[in-house]
Image: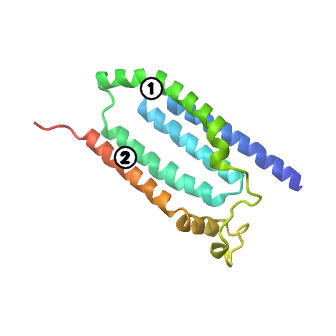
Amino acid sequence: MEHFIETIGRNMFAIFGVMALVGALLMIASRSAIHSVLGFLFAMLSIAGCFLSLEAEFLGMAQILVYAGGIVVLFLFVVMLVEMSKKKEGEVFQLQSRYAVVAVAVGAALFLTVFRKAIFGVASPEALVLRPELARGLDVAHQNAQAVSRGLFADYLLPFEILSVILLVALVGAVVLAKTERV
């Protein structure tokens, strides 16, 4: 029975993974900004499905709340604020697609050959490894959300705050781009 459940989980992960790739391709290939945001939403929901199939409930729900909820709404506001119908800007964006494909291919090849082992290293035998003082009184296997929050706000607080600053800069940049010049 346990083998059957593991096989179903692996198959669901593969299905959600393929759905995420389809959503990402729709996001990249779409000529409409709204359709691109909807492709992004589909990809983010599929990634949440991947997390849920791996029994990482906290990450799955965080994916839905943060990305599918907050970031997609932010992108929709940006799309509505920034007028994308100007002919001059449209031509610039159409020319960039060739360069973007080359950049993604080079980046993926570089990541797969050089950085993958340096960044990820050898997989841990446990799902989440916390320092002993952080893991005191916590069953990591059954208290997943508490373990992730302890690790996030203890060891990874600086990257978490840097990410929030980057999102704030993106929001301010969208407002600046959307602002019409007054003479």
The amino acid sitting under disc 2 is: Ala
At x 67% / y 40%, what residue is drawn?
17
Question: Quarter of the image holding residue 145?
Answer: bottom right
- Where is residue 46 drawn, in percent x and y? 62, 44
- Relative to 140, does residue 64 appear above or below in the rendering? above
- Relative to 73, does residue 93 appear above or below in the rendering? above
For residue 170, the mark is: 2
User: Which residue is the site of mark 1?
Assistant: 31
The amino acid sitting under disc 1 is: Arg
Quadrant where the image shows the N terminus: bottom right
Left/right placement of residue 85 relative to residue 183 reads right
- Relative to 134, does residue 25 appear above or below in the rendering? above
Colouring chosen for the image of the structure: rainbow
At x 32% / y 44%, what residue is drawn?
173
- Where is residue 182 drawn, in percent x and y? 13, 38
- Where is residue 30 drawn, in percent x and y? 48, 28
Left/right placement of residue 81 relative to residue 68 reads left
- Where is residue 50 drawn, in percent x and y? 67, 47
Question: Quarter of the image holding residue 59?
Answer: bottom right
For residue 147, the mark is: none
At x 52% / y 39%, what residue is drawn?
40
Q: Which element type, helix, strand or loop, lies under badge 1?
A: loop
Q: For mark 2, does the 10 Å Cα neighbourhood hold few (<14), some (14 to 19), or many (20 or more) residues?
A: some
Q: For mark 1, does the 10 Å Cα neighbourhood hold few (<14), some (14 to 19), or many (20 or more) residues?
A: few
